[in-house]
Amino acid sequence: MSGVWIISENRGQSMELLNIGRQLADKMGMRVAALLYQDREHVEDYINHGADEVMLLPPLSSEHPPESYIPVIIEEARKGEPDLILLPATPRGKNMAALLAARLNVGLVSSCTVIDFDKGSKTLVMERLAYGGAAVQKVICSTRPAMATIPPRTYDTAMPETGRQGHVRELPSPSPSAIKIIERKVKEREVKDISEARVVVCVGRGIEKEEDLAIARQLADVLGGAIGCTRPIAEEFHWLPEELCIGLSGVQVKPDLYLGVGVSGQVQHVTGIRNAKVVAAVNKDENAPIFKAADFGIIGDLYDVVPKLISELKK
């Protein structure tokens, strides 16, 4: 048993992966190694939060785009023989995971929501959503190392432990890549990242026209939260940016309070709010699927209910 490796590019990803990585390593009697290629400022922090070893790759550059690190990681994996490699299910994380799995000739389970170790069979059992979130698929990865990507915010951040000791080492620079980065253009975000919001007010097709989004924004402001939407609002009507679309193929949110306003609650959307602590909804259709997922529900016209909620909350 060699250990659990996590590969990440920032502190938020690392802390979440260290949480599940440390849990699994303790069950398996292993060590945890963190392999980082950007976030070098928090090395000691990672050790305090569960890493036994931190391996550092050279910073990204035009000579070393992320893909050029693959041979270096492959070489380390062949020498270190990890039992499990975890990466975040972000665009870059999924790309890196696929490239690593192909080169190592091992299995890869994408977008895992649960990973556990069965001590009896000594196997890793992984769960992921299937059929648009309508079912849960259980997967046993028989190759070594097993590989999985984890959606952001699936796990809480790891808890610190005082007095932990760990080893830090620099990995060699990769050979110059055939891929050259000619220019970088930062994509300006139009909105804040709602995956970090404590309160999310989500609008659905019950909103009749774009101008009426103002009442949802007022409600979000009063609650100190952020506004989100269902896919039709972003993709069909283009009333809000796609970054605010919540659901299986959109953003996964984990707020203390989710409030759906005019949201029908199809399974693809509900999958994106499954980790919300409290789910509330306003819909005039008493048979709307959202009420099956809600802890609290108000059956009524949002144009009547929401202004009253705003008025009461302001008092």
Image (cartoon, rainbow, N blue to C red):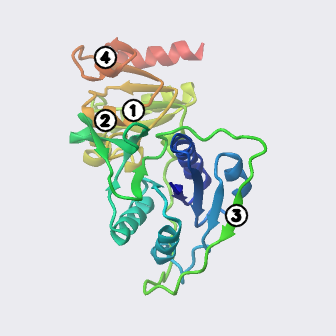
- Amino acid type shown at disc 2: His
- Amino acid type shown at disc 1: Ile
Number of the label disc, if any, that sits on residue 301: 4
Q: Horizontal placement of 16 versus 137: left or right?
A: right
- Amino acid type shown at disc 4: Asp
- Marks 1 and 2 sit apart, C-alpha to C-alpha, by 7 Å
Q: Nearer the viewer, mark 2 or mark 4?
A: 2
Residue under numbered circle 2? 269
Q: Quadrant of residue 105?
A: bottom left
Contact, mark 4 vs mark 1 (Cβ under 8 Å): no
**Which one is earlier in the sequence, the residue at label 1 or at label 3?**
3
Give whichever of 9, 299 is nearer the camera.
9
Can the viewer see residue 245?
no
Contact, mark 1 vs mark 2 (Cβ under 8 Å): yes
- Marks 2 and 4 sit apart, C-alpha to C-alpha, by 21 Å
Give whichever of 242, 12 is nearer the camera.
12
The image position of residue 254, as x and y in percent, is 48, 34
Can the viewer see residue 276?
yes
- Marks 4 and 1 sit apart, C-alpha to C-alpha, by 22 Å
Number of the label disc, if any, that sits on residue 273: 1
- Marks 3 and 4 sit apart, C-alpha to C-alpha, by 59 Å
Tell me the residue at 50%/31% (across/down): 255
Classify mark 4: residues with Cα within 10 Å, few (<14), some (14-19) or many (20+). Answer: some
The image position of residue 293, as x and y in percent, is 33, 22
Number of the label disc, if any, that sits on residue 168: 3
- Amino acid type shown at disc 3: Val
Give whichever of 130, 231 is nearer the camera.
130
- Marks 3 and 2 sit apart, C-alpha to C-alpha, by 42 Å
From the viewer's perspective, is residue 35 above or below residue 74?
above
Q: Horizontal placement of 308 versus 43: left or right?
A: left
